[in-house]
Amino acid sequence: MRKDLLYIDSNVFVYPVIYNLQVVDEAKKSKDLLLEIALGKVEAYTATVTWDEVAWVVRKVFGFEFSKFETFRS
């Protein structure tokens, strides 16, 4: 595995969604990092278990119906 490739943990996906970006600095930094990844400025990867954690948090915070809706919407 390349040394310059970043592993993205579930917190990076979750923080910008559940916390206020103006109040929680980690949420803003996570959003900025995800944007850099989306724009191709940073190369990163995650794991299947990370997505499981993200889904669990979304269901816990927003409820099952929300997570089910978002799954089928995309």
Image (cartoon, helix red, strand yellow):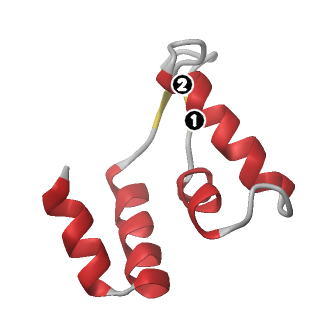
Q: What residue type is labelled 1?
A: Leu
**Residue at image point 50% right, 13% down:** 40
Residue position marked by numbered label 2 in the rendering: 37
**Residue at image point 51% right, 17% down:** 39
Q: In which quarter of the image is residue 33?
A: top right
* Residue 34 marker: 1
**Front in this rendered view, residue 45 or 70:** 70
Whole-number angstrom distance, CA of label 1 to CA of label 2: 5 Å
Q: In this view, does 31 lie above or below 63?
A: above
Q: Is residue 24 left or right of residue 15?
A: right
Q: Which amino acid does label 2 sit on?
A: Ile
Label 1–label 2 contact, CB within 8 A: yes
Identify the element where label 2 is drawn: helix
Name the spot of residue 59 as percent of width and height, x first: 37, 81
Q: Residue furthest left?
A: 72
Name the spot of residue 70 as percent of width and height, x first: 26, 63
Name the spot of residue 71 as percent of width and height, x first: 20, 61
Count of numbered tags? 2
Identify the element where label 1 is drawn: helix
**Residue at image point 53% right, 19% down:** 43
